[in-house]
Image (cartoon, grey):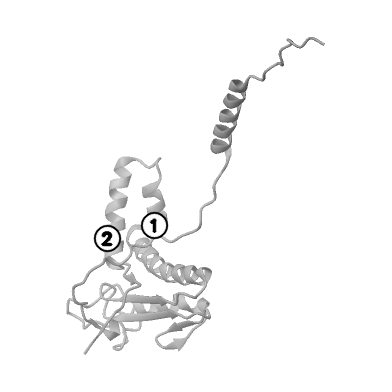
Amino acid sequence: MDRDRKIPEVNAGSMADIAFLLLIFFLVATSIETDVGLDRKLPPNDTSPPIPIAERNIFRVALNKNNELFVEDGIMQLKDLQAAAIAFLDNGAGTIGSKEYCDYCQGERNAESSENPDKAIISFNSDREASYGMYVSVQNELTSAYNTLRNREAVRLFNQDYVSMEKAYYAPETAVEAKISLKKNIEQIRQMFPMKLIEAETHKKG
């Protein structure tokens, strides 16, 4: 046997290149799933005293740790929440001729419910132990209540529902001139039914 025979070496440099290329391939090709969330603006960290709100203008919704839904101190099924929220937002109990009067509201104008959509606030409090799925479902029902009313007014004024206007506005293929008109119409509808859905503590007045 030849004792001076050299043992062949493996070229590790090329293997490192291959491993690096494989790493890049998996990073590019792998899709990472993200959790479903809600687009909500959290209340600011404000230390100033809370603004008193008339109780009639607050629609209280609460979710306990057992996923039981309470609306205005009474238990309610999730399927009934959207209709109850619409009735509150669209009530329009302001006095005729006053600045609180809502001439486009079609509600019952109950004196014990909201004066107008601008003053109407939906307060939603959820227990930390409630399921996230139920929390999202409640949020969706409340958001749908706003969209239903916005759709109604958008069709009445512009012959196009609000949700479709928003989709067209954010679509990249929509012309600039069309977006300018859509933005004006969308802002008008939002002013008619502003989304005042909060998850902060509200205080009674009087």
**In the structure shown, which secondary structural element does the residue marked by tag 1 occupy?**
loop
Separation (CA) of disc 2 from disc 1: 13 Å
Residue 13 visible to the viewer: yes
Left or right placement of residue 19 versus residue 151 in this view: right
| Percent coordinates x, y for residue 204 in the rendering | 26, 85
Q: Which residue has dot 1 on it?
A: 160
Sequence-wise first label, 2 or 1: 1
Q: Is residue 93 above or below residue 118?
A: below
Quarter of the image holding residue 118? bottom left
Give the foreground label among 2 and 1: 2
Q: Which residue has dot 2 on it?
A: 188
Kindly identify the residue that appears in the image at 41 percent across and 67 percent down. 143
Name the amino acid type tagged 2: Gln
Kindly identify the residue that appears in the image at 39 percent across and 86 percent down. 72
Left or right placement of residue 23 versus residue 122 in this view: right
Towards the viewer: 206 or 49:
49
Q: Is residue 79 above or below residue 143?
A: below
Name the amino acid type tagged 1: Gln
**In the structure shown, which secondary structural element does the residue marked by tag 2 occupy?**
helix
Residue 161 visible to the viewer: no
Q: Residue furthest front?
A: 3
